[in-house]
Image: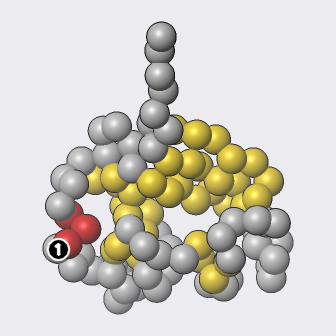
Amino acid sequence: MTYSIIMGYCYKLRCPKCTHEFEWREGSGKEFDVLHCDKCGKELLTTDRYLEYCNIKCECGGYFDKEVPIICPNCGVEIERPRPYVIDATEWI
């Protein structure tokens, strides 16, 4: 029997404020973790599992973390987890 372990999702979202469509990855992959800036939402992929504890600063002045709300990269609005703004969701490991 083969089991697949889903570690995260890649969402395609539409912002409720400006209608901009964008992707947002959450969770950990088999080979990397995804961190986001808590101010602008910029994504950082890392293979270092402990990097999230290093207070890495973003160009915008925010900090990268795992627990960041979904942020529209176009207008900066925070979006509720993710329904009803999800257009598509893909699982990744």
Would you say 24 lies left or right of 28 here? right
Give percent across and percent down for residue 86: 76, 59
Would you say 11 lies left or right of 37 here? right
Would you say 30 lies left or right of 15 here? left
Give percent across and percent down for residue 89: 68, 47
Question: Do we see residue 58 in this rendering?
Answer: yes
Q: Say which of 76 and 8 sits in front.
A: 8
Q: Say which of 84 and 32 sits in front.
A: 84
Give percent across and percent down for residue 45: 35, 54
Give percent across and percent down for residue 10: 59, 49
Q: Regarding mark 1 in the picture, which secondary structure is present there?
A: loop
Q: Quadrant of residue 74?
A: bottom right
Judge the density around disc 1: few (<14), some (14-19), many (≥20) Cα neighbours within 10 Å: few
Q: Give the amino acid at mark 1.
A: Cys
Q: Which residue is mark 1?
A: 54
Q: Say which of 7 and 70 sits in front.
A: 7
Residue shown at 24% from the left, 48% from the top: 47
